[in-house]
Image (cartoon, grey):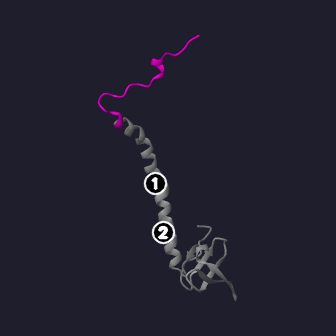
């Protein structure tokens, strides 16, 4: 039977010049690079979209055409308070909608997009 000697079971001796700190930094470099790439490709653009969405929602005023997250399209008739809007979805049919549930704001003068173009 073959048995491993204690020499094979021990780890390598530390470097003489104190280079273990540099070796540790070099082994962590790929992880740091991956985190930096993830930040600039995923987290930062998402934060920018959230800021744009919040600015869009806070700028809603009477007369704007809005689309809710449920797909309902209507015209804002009144902003009842900071959290709610009154939206007219048909003649004389008004609903109250939370501002957070607004997916898109279409301006009053924006033309309908042509499907053939």
Quick one: label 2 or label 1, which is nearer the N terminus? 1
Q: Nearer the viewer, residue 30 or 19?
A: 19
Q: Which of the 4 quarters of the picture holds residue 26?
A: top left
Q: Which residue is mark 1?
A: 39
Q: Where does the image place residue 102, in percent across and percent down from the top left?
A: 60, 74
What is the tally of numbered marks visible in this picture? 2
Q: Which residue is mark 2?
A: 51
Q: Nearer the viewer, residue 2 or 97?
A: 2
The residue at the far top in this view is: 1
Residue 7: in magenta span? yes
The crowding category of the residue bearing disc 2, from other C-alpha atoms within 10 Å (few below 14, some 14 to 19, many at least 20), is few
Q: Can residue 91 be seen from the camera position used here?
A: no
The residue at the far bottom in this view is: 92
Q: Which of the 4 quarters of the picture holds residue 101?
A: bottom right
Kindly indicate whether the residue at mark 1 contacts the one at mark 2 (C-beta within 8 angstroms).
Answer: no
Q: Where does the image place residue 92, in percent across and percent down from the top left?
A: 70, 89
What's the residue at 59%, 86% (across, down)?
80
**Is 65 on the left or on the right of 25, as rendered?**
right
What span is colored magenta in the figure? Answer: 1-21
The residue at the far left in this view is: 17
Q: Quadrant of the C terminus?
A: bottom right
């Amino acid at each position: 039977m073959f048995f491993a000697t204690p020499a094979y079971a021990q780890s390598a001796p530390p470097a003489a010049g104190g280079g273990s700190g540099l070796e540790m930094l070099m082994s962590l470099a790929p992880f740091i690079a991956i985190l930096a790439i993830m930040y600039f490709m995923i987290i930062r653009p998402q934060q920018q979209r959230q800021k744009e969405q919040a600015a869009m929602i806070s700028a809603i005023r009477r007369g704007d055409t809005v689309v809710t997250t449920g797909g309902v399209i209507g015209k804002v008739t009144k902003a009842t308070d900071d959290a709610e809007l009154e939206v007219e979805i048909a003649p004389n049919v008004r609903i109250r909608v939370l501002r957070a549930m607004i997916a898109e704001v279409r301006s009053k003068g924006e033309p309908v997009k042509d499907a053939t173009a």
